[in-house]
Image (spheres, rainbow, N blue to C red):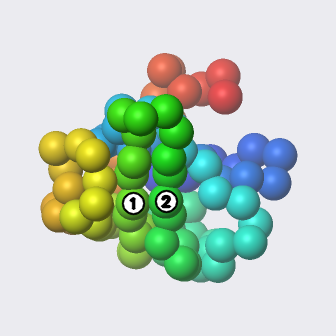
């Protein structure tokens, strides 16, 4: 199954650290592989005070950097499949 989904010019993936969907625009370099995606540069998601997620996605793996505010910081794990009922309407 695909790890990311393209919707209206954006790429979306499920972040297991935040347990929410993050998206990046067309300004990121993307290898075109929806099963083993690679994006460059890093992806930084910030929001209200409790969201700070910083990662690299390379070859279908998500590497969380040390400045993340969740329990997966400093870990690299397999990017989960996007095809999930929870996100299918996005």
**Numbered disc 2: secondary structure:** strand
Q: Evaluate whether residue 78 shows in this view.
A: no
Occupied quadrant, residue 11: bottom right
N-terminal of the two: label 2 or label 1? 2
Q: Quadrant of residue 31?
A: bottom right
Query: In this rendering, is residue 22 above or below 90?
Result: below
Q: Quadrant of the C terminus?
A: top right
Residue under the point 48% across and 72% down: 42
Residue 51 x/y as whole percent: 41, 39
Mark number, residue 54: 1
Count of picture labels? 2
Closer to the camera, 66 or 12? 66
Element assignment for label 1: strand
Task: Determine the CA span between mark 2 and mark 1.
Answer: 4 Å
The residue at the point 64 percent across, 78 percent down is 29
Give the residue number, with chain letter if any, for mark 2.
44
In this rendering, the answer to whether 82 lies above or below 56 is: above
- Residue 27 appears left or right of 14: right
Q: Tell me the crowding category of disc 2: few under 14, some 14 to 19, or many 20 or more residues within 10 angstroms, Cα based.
A: some
Q: Position of residue 52 (x, y in %)?
A: 39, 48
């Amino acid at each position: 199954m695909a790890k990311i989904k393209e919707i209206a010019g954006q790429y979306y993936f499920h972040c297991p650290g935040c347990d929410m969907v993050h998206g990046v625009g067309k300004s990121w370099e993307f290898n075109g592989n929806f099963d083993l995606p690679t994006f460059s540069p890093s992806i930084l998601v910030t929001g209200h005070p409790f969201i700070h997620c910083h990662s690299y996605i390379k070859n279908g793996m998500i590497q969380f950097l040390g400045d993340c505010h969740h329990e997966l910081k400093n870990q690299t794990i397999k990017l989960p499949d996007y095809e999930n009922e929870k996100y299918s309407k996005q």
